[in-house]
Image (cartoon, rainbow, N blue to C red):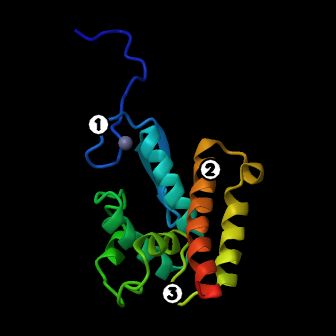
Amino acid sequence: MNSPDTKTTTTRNCHCKGCVKEGTYRAPQSPKELDVILWFCLEHIREHNARWNYLDSATPQEIEKTIRQATVWERPTWPFSKGPLAAKRTQRTGPPASPALPEKVRKALHFLALREPVSWEAIKARYRALAKRYHPDTNGSGSSDIAKFHAVQEAFGTLKNYYAKKRTGA
Ligand SMILES: [Zn+2]
């Protein structure tokens, strides 16, 4: 007994492992896999977009680093569960960032795709580029960009505190 009102109410689950919300927002899997469309809930589409925009501008090394960071500091089930980026994730190259850095500073560096040794000038340049990219007036595409804009500012603030002190020898 089929109901006649079988309109397109097909529901998808969010692509994030363990997320039981409905996947109502679509996004390509990665900058390299624009054909692979994934569906996310609002929370996870924001995370996906944040990661996406970041990856889009990063070098392969930076991407690899970010994915390691994501697996260590953020949720362990990051949606890059397949594809070339996942393959890279298993390759461990080089030592982690300087253990002398406070974790907060290391995370901020990671977030801005920087690594020690890094100059204050380089930090400022990266901040300016990202702040411009995510500024609401630049792309006007909604709250997730504002969230990224604030996240970039927060990371920069952390680095500013740390490196400003370092420069003055305080
Ligand atoms: Zn979700």
Give residue 157's mark: none
**Residue for point 69% across, 75% down:** 124
Left or right of residue 67, residue 19 in this image:
left
Of labels 2 and 3, earlier in sequence is 3
Q: Which residue is mark 1?
A: 20
- Residue at the image point whose x is 56% and y is 76% from the top: 162
Q: Give the spatial CA distance, label 2 vs label 3.
A: 27 Å
Residue of label 2: 145
Q: Residue furthest left?
A: 1
First of labels 1, 2 by sequence position: 1
Q: Helix or strand or loop: what does disc 2 sit on?
A: helix
| Classed neighbour count for the residue bearing mark 3: other residues with Cα under 10 Å, few (<14), some (14–19), many (≥20) | few
Give coordinates of residue 144: x percent, y percent.
58, 46
Q: Is residue 134 left or right of residue 3?
A: right
Mark 3 → mark 1, Cα distance in angstroms? 39 Å
Q: Position of residue 104 (x, y in %)?
A: 45, 69
The image quadrant where one finds the C terminus is bottom right
Residue found farthest to the front: 170
- Disc 1: CA contacts within 10 A as few (<14), some (14-19) or many (>=20): few
Closer to us: mark 2 or mark 3? 3
Amino acid residing under circle 3: Glu
Q: Is mark 1 within 8 Å of ligand 1?
A: yes
In the image, 133 versus 109, the foreground residue is: 109
Dividing the image into four quarters, tell me where ligand 1 lies.
top left
Please determine whether, in this image, residue 123 is positioned above or below residue 11. Answer: below
Q: Please state which amino acid type lies under the numbered disc 2.
A: Asp
Quadrant of res 160: bottom right
- In the foreground, 44 or 122: 122
Numbered disc in front, either 3 or 1: 3
Mark number displayed over residue 116:
3
Query: Separation of disc 1 and disc 2 at Cα?
Result: 25 Å
